[in-house]
Image (spheres, coloured by chain):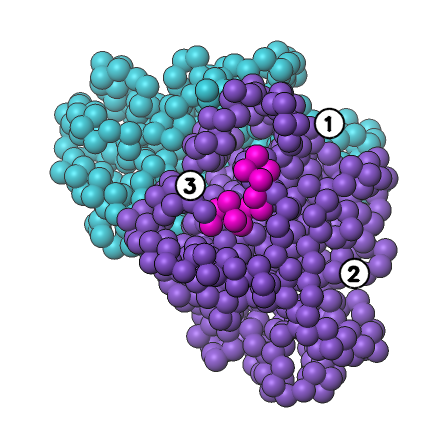
Chain colours: A cyan, B purple
Amino acid sequence: MSTIVSVETRDIRFPTSLELDGSDAMNPDPDYSAAYLTIRTDAADGLEGHAFVFTIGRGNDVQVAALDTLRGHLLGQDVEALLGDMGSAWRLLAHDSQLRWLGPEKGVMHMAIGAAVNALWDLKAKRAGLPLWQLLAGMSPDELVALVDFRYLTDAITPGEAVELFRAAEPGRAERTAQLLEQGYPAYTTTPGWLGYSDEKLERLCREAVADGYPQIKLKVGADLADDRRRFAIARATVGPDFPIAIDANQRWDVGAAIEWVNALAEFDPVWIEEPTSPDDVLGHAAISRAIAPIRVATGEHVQNRIVFKQLLQAGGMDVMQIDATRVGGVNENIANLLLAAKFGVPVCPHAGGVGLCEAVQHLSMFDYVALSGTMDGRMIEFVDHLHEHFVTPAAVRRGRYVIPTAPGAGTEMLAASVDAFTWRGAHVGRVPA
Amino acid sequence: MSTIVSVETRDIRFPTSLELDGSDAMNPDPDYSAAYLTIRTDAADGLEGHAFVFTIGRGNDVQVAALDTLRGHLLGQDVEALLGDMGSAWRLLAHDSQLRWLGPEKGVMHMAIGAAVNALWDLKAKRAGLPLWQLLAGMSPDELVALVDFRYLTDAITPGEAVELFRAAEPGRAERTAQLLEQGYPAYTTTPGWLGYSDEKLERLCREAVADGYPQIKLKVGADLADDRRRFAIARATVGPDFPIAIDANQRWDVGAAIEWVNALAEFDPVWIEEPTSPDDVLGHAAISRAIAPIRVATGEHVQNRIVFKQLLQAGGMDVMQIDATRVGGVNENIANLLLAAKFGVPVCPHAGGVGLCEAVQHLSMFDYVALSGTMDGRMIEFVDHLHEHFVTPAAVRRGRYVIPTAPGAGTEMLAASVDAFTWRGAHVGRVPA
């Protein structure tokens, strides 16, 4: 038996705003950051659990404060009991009635709870000697369903239906695992499409993306329609008429504006429009989806929890689900999201990029392929080639596909040297608005 | 010209869990708390702006950290410029792209922004020598509409429509102000209905509520149906068949359970069911509202922002709007909420209680009466007789009506002695879950 003896947090910020990498219509100068959590035990194995919340700079200290406030829930816990019942581990954190008031189940506090849950999964996977995707894909349907909090979901999916979905995918798990390890998982790239880049850089990066074997690229839009039309035309001319190009407005528009703007870009044949409006606007997404069909609506990176995902699906406002590894309440809540997508027959194409999001979220898609959806059709994981060098097991893409991670853990551990080098020491790298 | 020279925060917690005051189906042991903000300037008048976020204990430190992170936005600002354009003051805080990532517009960071906005309103009202409600009710329709961020609202209400709503209420402002000052504003009481109370205490408090002149009481429900039926029967027998009794489930149920439970209490004639399910579940509220009519659905104390309020109205999921003074982005966003309620013809009955929520939210209902809805029909403000003694200008109710505040400010300033006495010094008053 072992005990959690240390819960350490760090405020880590990378000065990405200096390069304009990651600039979009709503986020002109992000400093990619991580509120980073390390859980240590007194077990002889010396294994640690690592996880983080991704932020874009200011406020990363608030996210760290939220992680700090979970220390009392974790310190002294029996590790084997906690890791042996991860459904209860989620409830220990997410159902704390006083902390719940700060959401409920949304924003800073919920993301912190998600990181704590994910750090436990990292530790559990390391103890099992398996990458997280494979640990999950080896669990029984009943074990998997026990991880999920069905509160507020039962009008869309019941635990019994969830068990049936997992059972239906049990045949072929071994074959799909072998196929996954051999072939990898499809990726698409956002690297060409940031708003801060010159037309020449856009064109060069589009050409490189095709040459590198990516099956799809994505362009940021929404700041200026004339610019968007010019940039989309350049991208389309560069990649050819049949190559899928997604567009991403990062919540820039109201409902009416979204419909007009997307229709004004329709001639360039976007495969989806991502985050056309507020991630909270279920009915707005549904109205947009109806008005721009057959162009699809994709969203999720800012969807706060399973309850909003549920409604986006119920209302027909989400044609592509983009889960994020650090926005919701961790692996457990993302399994709920994957179940909802399976129930409603919507493909999951996770949001990634930032710091460590590729490393983390890939496990969920790979688990989904082996144990739930059983298909890669229309599925791919976003890839941005930034900041991977700071991770112990960096995500890697070859010929447009994620290389399947085989190292034990959830992929969320940063290099100690990077943690030390980029720990925030109080100077603002980004600009404070005047 | 003056400048903001100090932004001070305090973590204030009252040990209310020891008394079971405030216990409900989701919040068994709240420690009513305030993340408290004081803004000071170098002006000779010595006036300060005070505001807070209400929480229920653990995590109040996270909320304080969120207030602290706004210091850089406020310190050194030109006070006259800031207070002279409160629409821009909101945008300065709510549109910070890096902080926005932590929501967007929800949870800890958004509530902190709301408190900063409210502290500026408190200072502005004190400088004007007016209570906040009267300061707002003296502004022109154009000035009021300039306070509101219409982003994500224009599919439901445009700035032009908002101006028209305010203009339509301009005639009669003076008469309604005089009437308000003379007659007060209707209150209802939740004091009898907490789950932790004995049947004898419930009956006694119901009797007292009627004797005190309240036009409505509210009971907490949702922990146990047999208990709810027994308690509701006692309350109904005590107050008589025609007296309005609201019930409040504090988000306890899934959609199907809400419909069954409320219908199982229908014989006791509840006037509304409050928070039947997750505050995020717009479609769920709409389904419940359809299935339990003519019993009305009330919600709002945990509704994160104007975008969710908009949808609850669009979907027919909210028959009574319960704004909260410290959940959304402050006075500015609550004016947006009042406009949405006016547009959709739904009465606003604010959530109050906690620490200082009565003191703060009353100003919004009174402003609404004078300058927007122009009516008190079906409107009332919740009142709970707790912790008012800690405020410089405590809310007061006489004969079931709020006494109209006339002191300058927003009502949100606590007594210095209370701030000192209840500043948190690290011992957990509430219980940490095992």
**Label 3 lies in what chain?**
B
Q: Is residue B229 magenta?
A: no
Same chain assignment for discs 2 and 3? yes
Please report the residue visible at 62 percent of the width from the left and 74 percent of the height from the top.
B215
Q: Say few, some or many: other residues with alpha carbon within 10 Å of mark 1 (under 14 / 14 to 19 / 20 or more).
A: some
* Residue at mark 3: B147
Near-viewer residue (B31 or A302)? B31
Measured from the top left, where is residue B87 in percent x and y? 43, 36
* Gap between marks 1 and 3 measured at Cα: 42 Å
Secondary structure that dominates the magenta span: helix
Query: Which residues, given as a range, are shown in magenta?
Result: B126-137
Residue B249: give x, y in percent of width and height: 63, 67
Q: Is A197 or B301 nearer to us in this picture?
A: B301
Q: Which residue is mark 2?
A: B21
Mark 2 element type: loop
Disc on the earlier residue, 2 or 3: 2
Q: Residue B132 colored magenta?
A: yes
User: Which residue is identified by label 1?
Assistant: A8
* Crowding at mark 3 (Cα within 10 Å: few <14, some 14-19, many 20+): many
Q: CA distance from mark 2 to mark 3?
A: 37 Å
- State whether residue A75 is above or below residue A105: above
Q: Secondary structure at mark 3?
A: loop
Report the chain holding disc 1: A
